[in-house]
């Protein structure tokens, strides 16, 4: 990968890894779906200059907005509400194998032995990280996170097909089309939204700002940039290192305990991701 590609990957890791503990802080003041709606509203404001009509591609953009705004983010933040930050950052890594499997089945991408070994090493680290959660987690909320991970994998393949639309143009339209979906969802599943918004303090609004600028502009912008330049099966495993960032941030921000098991698991995960990122690509993918 080029230096700019590596920088984009690191930006994705940092912003998405911090998503989990910061989202937990924000949910103390704002309901999950309401927080997502505010995030998208701010995203539209920030990316308004990029909001140009995607000629001939609106249908595909709409499908991406449904996968992300209708399923991925509502399910992810709904799941985070019932699971501690460390566990949620681990479970969400199901998105990588989902994306690789879909890329093999649909796009015909190939995997080398080295990259398969890297995936195995990274998953070994994730398995260790998942071995000792600090709190009991709701199985329903874990299932929501797994479903969210699958929706992310679907969106990643759809984004791979959009080579003629700018990264920020895509994210601006996803935000516009996601807002009505989230509004309907929050009206059905949440109550007291207006009161929560009126009473929210710096934690709630700070979370919204971080999710919009970090999670969407930097995170999804960087991921969209990488997906257009590299095979899906090479890019998505980068997200396997997100639990390392998530667990470290949970220890620092939420005062969750850091054990030797989690430290070793984090190193294994990072090592596996490094192998996947820097191993030679198969000839067909090149």
Image: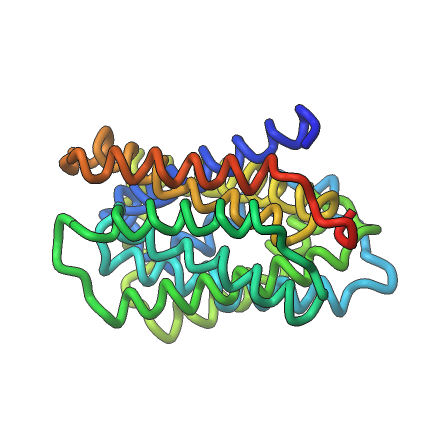
In the rendered structure, the answer to whether residue 82 lies left or right of residue 219 reads left
Whether residue 119 is situated above or below residue 105 in the rendered picture: above
Q: Name the image quarter holding the N terminus.
A: top right
Outermost residue to the bottom: 188
| Applied colour scheme | rainbow
Q: Position of residue 194 (x, y in %)?
A: 34, 57
Viewer-closest of 283 and 17: 283
Q: Disc count in the image?
A: 0
Residue at the image point whose x is 23% and y is 60% from the top: 82
Q: Residue 223 occupies which quadrant of the picture?
A: top right
Whether residue 107 is situated above or below residue 263 in the rendered picture: below
Q: Position of residue 13 (x, y in %)?
A: 47, 37
Viewer-closest of 118 and 14: 118
Outermost residue to the right: 56
Residue at the image point whose x is 20% and y is 36% from the top: 254
Whether residue 140 is situated above or below residue 36 in the rendered picture: below
Outermost residue to the front: 113
Whether residue 68 is visible, yes or no, is: no
Q: Position of residue 63 (x, y in %)?
A: 66, 68
Viewer-closest of 234 and 32: 234
Q: Position of residue 148 (x, y in %)?
A: 44, 64
Whether residue 278 is visible, yes or no, is: yes
Residue at the image point whose x is 13% and y is 59% from the top: 136
In the rendered structure, the answer to whether residue 170 lies left or right of residue 95 reads right
Q: Residue 59 occupies which quadrant of the picture?
A: bottom right
Residue at the image point whose x is 62% and y is 57% from the top: 156
Whether residue 183 is situated above or below residue 246 in the rendered picture: below
């Amino acid at each position: 990968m080029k230096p700019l590609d590596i920088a984009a990957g690191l930006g994705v890791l940092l912003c998405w890894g911090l998503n989990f503990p910061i989202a937990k802080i924000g949910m103390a003041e704002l309901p999950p779906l309401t927080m997502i709606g505010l995030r998208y509203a701010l995203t539209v404001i920030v990316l308004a200059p990029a909001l140009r009509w995607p000629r001939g591609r609106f249908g595909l953009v709409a499908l991406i907005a449904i996968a992300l705004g209708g399923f991925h983010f509502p399910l992810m933040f709904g799941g985070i509400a019932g699971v501690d930050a460390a566990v949620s950052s681990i479970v969400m890594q199901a998105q990588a194998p989902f994306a690789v499997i879909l890329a093999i089945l649909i796009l015909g991408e190939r995997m080398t032995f080295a990259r398969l070994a890297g995936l195995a090493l990274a998953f070994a680290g994730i398995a260790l990280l998942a071995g000792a959660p600090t709190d009991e987690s709701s199985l329903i909320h874990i299932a929501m996170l797994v479903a969210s991970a699958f929706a992310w994998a679907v969106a990643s393949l759809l984004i791979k097909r959009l080579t003629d639309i700018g990264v920020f143009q895509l994210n601006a339209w996803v935000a516009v089309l996601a807002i009505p979906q989230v509004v309907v969802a929050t009206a059905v599943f949440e109550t007291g939204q207006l009161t929560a918004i009126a009473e929210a303090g710096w934690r709630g609004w700070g979370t919204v700002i971080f999710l919009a600028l970090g999670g969407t502009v930097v995170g999804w912008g960087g991921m969209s940039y990488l997906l257009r330049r590299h095979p899906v099966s090479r890019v998505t495993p980068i997200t396997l290192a997100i639990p390392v960032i998530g667990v470290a941030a949970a220890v620092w921000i939420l005062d969750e305990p850091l054990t030797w098991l989690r430290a070793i698991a984090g190193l294994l995960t990072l090592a596996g991701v490094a192998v996947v990122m820097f191993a030679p690509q198969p000839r067909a993918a090149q």
